[in-house]
Amino acid sequence: MSVKQMVKTRSLVLLKVRRTLSRYRMIEAGDGVLVGVSGGPDSVSLLHLLWSLKEELGFSLAAAHLNHRLRGKESDGDEDFVRQMASKLGVRLITESVEVGTVAERESLNLEEAARKERYSFLLKTAKSLSLSKIAVGHTRSDQAETFLLRLLRGSGMRGLASIYPVKDSIFIRPLIETSREEIIAYLEENNLGYRVDSSNYDLSFKRNYIRGVLLPLLENSASKNIEEILSRTAEVLREEDDFLNSRTTHLFGKLARIEDGAVIFNASQLREQHLALRRRLLREAISHLKSDTLSITFDHGKKALQLLNEEKRGKRISLPDKVIIERRGGELVIRRKEPPPVEEFFYEVSLPGEAYIREVNQKFKLTSLPLEEFRRRYHLQAGGCAFLDRAKLSQPLIVRNRRSGDYFFPLGARGYTKLKNFFINKKIPREERDKLPLFISRGKICWVAGVQIGESFKVSDTTKEVVIIERG
């Protein structure tokens, strides 16, 4: 690519990103944006582009990097690179490390699924702790084309083929979704921006790598030079039609579905009256009420569920991934989670400072304390997953246990005590998770429902002298 072409490409990339931000209303003046930065070319260019536009468009910027601990020194090198770039741009950076391999083994996920789960959880937690309203990730038009082919070859409906949405859940934004990887590389070269290369991207045993390195170039050479643009445009059309069907599905779900004790229940006759396409979508909508996504639900799973809908035999059931069960109960179709084995009651004592390992739920906590002024310099009161408590209001030792019948809780900001069961319901804590949540108890009162909420009586205030910090180990 000539120098003249590169300058033209740089201007084109800035124009495209600005247009994409406007077209999908990704960022408004006054927004705070967190950029997920891995160190690869897409995320590096994204951070630089948004840094270049933040003054013009009137938004603030921070960055986040999660070290997956999968590639040893290479992973640490990625983190160091991102630190240096953020420092050079004057952008605040939040980093964290996680043993993705351990997570994958513990939760029976492949490495890609575990990494994605941990990454998005980290980004959401960080955005919340920094009070940022948007999270920008570096998916490009090239990623969209690859995802389209990946899902087409796996077998997917319209929703899957619609591929990557420019905006998801009003939080996640993808400013590079209309920009190709070739344009990104040219932008990086023009701006003398380095980037990290993940060596695993060249392993063709991974399906996405094979599509990127073999299949797309083959289609480009034999079918169309614009294959990437064609696939992206097709995905865009499917997204628009999917949006219409989604609105129709949401409307019908509100009319036909009944939610009871965490289960979704349909009148089988009413569900059978709907068009086949809507029946499929209504079943997926029901499953999404029970688990965070439906990525593991295949066409064959949906086919079996629809066959069960036509069964009249009471009590017949099918099992789906992630412990989802669909069964016939008389004239009803019930979608629910498989009841997990009961969690043992646990009871521990922990001193300040100290550590607690809860064997029954495989969770570790570390308790430390700091003077108020030092705490304010080092921590943000909204930091997710941690508890900050007034030490003077705590007894020694603290008790850590799971819930018991008759527990009451006075949540932060509430007017008074409520049954712990009602608190869980209001917070939409799944039934199967409630017995697993460690409760930190001081003088018989709940001071922290781990990872959820602290008690009003134990909050840090201007009169606090020393703050107890409880973090997951």
Image (cartoon, helix red, strand yellow):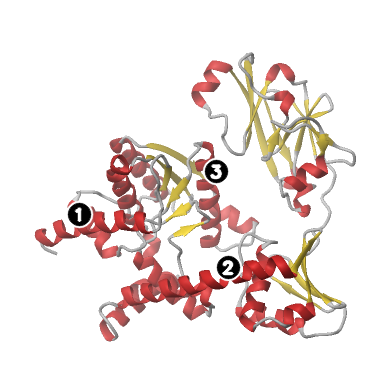
Residue 189, numbered circle: 1
C-alpha gap between disc 1 and disc 3 = 33 Å
Residue 332, by quadrant, is bottom right
Residue drawn 33% across the image and 77% down it: 230
Q: Nearer the viewer, residue 127 or 450?
A: 127
Distance Cα–Cα, label 3 vs label 2: 29 Å
Image mark for residue 125: 3
Q: Position of residue 449 (x, y in %)?
A: 73, 37
Of the residues tagged 1 and 3, which is closer to the observer?
3
Please tell me which residue is depicted at 28% across the width and 42% down the height of the picture: 56
Task: Please report the residue visible at 68 percent of the width from the left and 68 percent of the height from the top.
Answer: 253
Q: Is residue 146 visible?
A: yes
Nearer-N-terminus badge (3/2) = 3
**Type of residue at label 2?**
Ser
Q: Residues within 10 Å of mark 1 (few under 14, many from 20)?
A: few
- Can the viewer see residue 205 in this picture? no
Q: Is residue 68 above or below residue 31?
A: below
- Name the side, left or right, on which 300 lies relative to 26: right
Q: Residue furthest right?
A: 406
**Location of the N terminus (image quadrant):** bottom left
Q: Amino acid at mark 1?
A: Glu
SS at circle 1? helix
Residue 468 placement (x, y as % from top left): 65, 24
Q: Which mark is residue 247?
A: 2
Going from N to C along the chain, the mark reached first, 1 or 3, is 3
Vertical placement of residue 291 versus 466, above or below: below
The x and y percentages for residue 438 are: 75, 40
